[in-house]
Amino acid sequence: MLKVATAVFVFLGGFAVMVLEIIGARYLARDFGGSFYVWISQIGVILIALALGYAVGGALADRFRRAGFLAVPLGIAGVFTLFIPNFTPPLLEAIVMRHPPGEEIPALWQKLDPVLGSTLVFFLPCVVLATLCPYMIRLSTRHLERVGTISGLTYAASTVGSIAGVFVSGYIFIDHLTLPAIFRATGTLALFLAGLSLAMDRWLK
Amino acid sequence: MSAILLKRAACFCALLNCVAGQAAIVFDRFSAYHHIQVLDERGVRTLSFNGSMETRMSLANPRQGHFEYTEYFQMPWLWNHDIKRVLMAGLGGGSTQRAYQHYYTNVVVDTVELDPVVVSVARTYFGVIETPRHRIHTDDARVFLRRTTNTYDVILMDAYATTRYGSSLPPHLTTREFFTAVRERLTTNGVIAYNVIGRTAGWRANIVGALYRTMNDVFPRVYLFPAKESQNVVLLATVSAERFDAGRLQREAATLLRSGTVKLATFSARLTSFMNNPPPASAQSPVLTDDHAPIESLLAGEGPPR
């Protein structure tokens, strides 16, 4: 049961990251346009968030050693994501409109404005979602000689989730859901993961 | 200097290829957005993005050889006889810019083009020049519109993203919020003309219908000019609520041609494409919004998903 729960947990975490990345690029185009740099910054910023999340997640796992601890950051990430459609439009507008009107935006800021946008909107939830993988590897490992298998399977489950996130976003969500609805669904998913992390502690006992 | 040599070499190749019946590649480069090629064949220069033709131009007379649909970008004169300032999104090989610079010498044109490589190709290979009457801004059309303090009598939209599978509309340039931003930058007698690749019925009719619905959500009147020689429809919308019919159009054209305001030889012939009824697909089309613009599935012809 716990193994299945762990796999589902990291699968859904990986899923949510890629929904935010793909849908996020479309969301940012309203303010930053169809620029190539929107994709560059979206991919770059999410990867920075993942790197940070992996490092932090592993360290936290060594310290706390219970899944339930993740309920706190996941809860914050969930609420944050739920309200992306509400609080981010004025922030993104401020990034673009801080340049004097009627003048061309300097080349450097044409590249870096979308990076600021991606960071403001997507960095926090993606850092949190990236902690799940190393955290669950630590919790699932009982014997050192099995750590290779367990870490491999955990990363595989998370990445399969990410793959699903890419295709489901591009083929289904974009066609049938509004962008705010997709963010709310992803925020709800993170809150569900927070609940699941608490439940996993109970199953561990 | 090397550019001149390159051009000479290109012309020479074009002559040779006239005999061989094969296009000479004059320019070939991948930009951030497209695989851009300039091809010369039988005295005609073509701009190609990812294998699809964007612009055609006669090498002997750069004002000839263009696609017929670009002439519909001169139709806004029918609604506004006093056009002074035009914004055009999408440069390509600059057919429309050339036409405006030649025929309408009092009009100031701003061009917004996202891809800096397209700008340099237009300058080098398609004779697009920047003058006080024509400025090029390397920017996204929507970002530009939002930040500009200018108002325009006419806004022309021909901004396309292309893939191996054909051209695709940038979603953020199709929504109600985008057209609202357009209307805010138009004068009281302003006109927007929007090139949509597709037909009023059949191939890609869903995207034409959705654009019609969306434009009509923001502008009181929307008209269509389906191209005769290609699979394009130019949608034209006015800030004014006055309704024009074919008869009114003929009278306006007669005035424009008589006064010499419009000199395009084929202007009258283009009027025959005019349609003032909604395209059939618009009835079940969604209004596209920033929150929901399923451009990809509309282009794929699966029908409106909601």
Image (spheres, coloured by chain):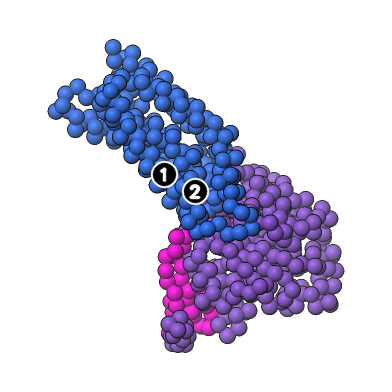
User: With B101 as the anchor, is A156 left or right in this view?
Assistant: left
Q: Eyeballing the image, is B284 above or below B151?
A: above
Q: Residue at x 50, y 32 (%)?
A: A81
* Chain A: drawing colour: blue
Q: Eyeballing the image, is A60 above or below B88?
A: above
Horizontal and vertical percent for residue B158? 61, 62
Q: Residue at x 73, y 57 (%)?
A: B186
Q: Eyeballing the image, is B194 above or below A51?
A: below
Q: Which residue is mark 1?
A: A45
- Chain letter of disc 2? A
- Location of the N terminus of chain B by quadrant is bottom left
What kind of element bears circle 1? Answer: helix
* The residue positioned farthest toward the left in the image shown: A145
Q: Which residue is mark 2?
A: A114
Is residue A152 at least partly visible in the picture? yes
* Chain B: drawing colour: purple
> Which image quadrant for residue B56?
bottom right
Is residue A48 inside the magenta stretch? no
Question: Looking at the image, do the residues carrying marks 1 and 2 touch, with CB atoms under 8 Å apart?
Answer: no
- Chain letter of disc 1? A
What kind of element bears circle 2? Answer: helix
> Which image quadrant for residue B107?
bottom right
